[in-house]
Amino acid sequence: MERRRFGGTDMDVSVLGFGSSEIGFQGTAEETVSRLLNEALDQGLNVIDTAECYLTSEALIGNTISHRRDDYFLFTKCGHPDGLGSEDWSISGILSSIQRSLRRLKTDCVDLVLLHTCSEQMLRQGDVIEALQQARDRGYTRYIGYSGDRMEMKYAIECGAFDAIETSMSIADQQPLTLTLPLAKERNLGVIIKRPIANAAWKASQEPVNPYVKTYRDRLAALVYDFLKEDLQTSVGVALRFTAAGPGVHTLIVGTTKPGRWQENATLLEAGPLANEEAQKIHDRWKEVADDTWIGES
């Protein structure tokens, strides 16, 4: 598995990481999570991304692989203590959130804590950044970052406070290719990509419940990419490799509840990032079709 130096940090991260929202939201059995994560670590994965609001996710990670803490870089997110519908951006609230995460993850320190989609106004107010800086000073985390999209992400990069960012980018979500990723690369930030295959929305056979999937499916229906007409393995491979070729991208976070699926995706990436010419062709089609409403999906 290819590894890339994560911006200005001391971490060499696997180009494919594990996103743990699915195991939390779907209530995956601990035995299944243990098999899934241990197999992925054995095969070269070394990035695990989670958040306090992903229900049981942090506890599942802590219960199954905390004994292998030296084998992976651990990223978590804060700001939604009682689920995605809740918010607490106070300094005390963020510090308490991080402490709870550490206990569930069974570790003294994570490698990266990210603010989880707070507004540009909140970033400018400053308390959220001060909270993360205090967490770093106390040894709760080695690095700090921001997870989000659109203009709030642009500000997060420009403000100079963060070591890393996490943002959505895919064949169905290409705004960051021009708005934020070149700037993050220029600033030498670590870059994590969430939803790198657009939730494989093109394979949805009925009206999606998940709003992200519906948005992505509608966009892809308008884009009419030829490669999406191929078998699923081929289409997912092109989608993954397109995202991996983005400017300054270091690791792609893909979630699954099925042991073996991570290795299937890792195998697809062995061909390397999509060639510049092919990636440009996909982006050119985006520029032809996308309108002002096709903004990044947080």
Image (tube, helix red, strand yellow):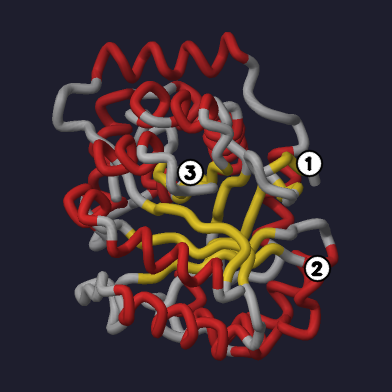
Q: Residue at x 32, y 74 (%)?
A: 91
**Marks 3 and 1, how far apart in space?**
18 Å
Dot 3 crowding, Cα within 10 Å, few <14, some 14–19, many 20+: many
User: Pointer 2: what residue?
Assistant: 71
Q: Amino acid at mark 2?
A: Asp
Q: Please tell me whether mark 3 sits on a helix, a strand or a loop.
A: loop
- Position of residue 249 relative to residue 223, above or below, is below
Residue 270 vs residue 231, the one in the foreground: 270
Mark 2 and mark 3: span between their CA atoms? Answer: 26 Å
Residue at numbered disc 3 = 197
Secondary structure state at the residue bearing disc 1: loop
Marks 2 and 1 sit apart, C-alpha to C-alpha, by 16 Å
Which of label 2 and label 1 is nearer to you? 2
Residue 109, percent across and down? 64, 76
Of labels 2 and 1, earlier in sequence is 1
Q: Secondary structure at mark 2?
A: helix
Dot 2 or dot 3, earlier in sequence: 2
Q: Which residue is mark 1?
A: 2
Is residue 256 depicted above or below 162 in this figure?
A: below
Please identify the quarter of the rendering in which residue 150 is found.
Answer: top left
Residue 129, relative to residue 195: is it above or below?
below
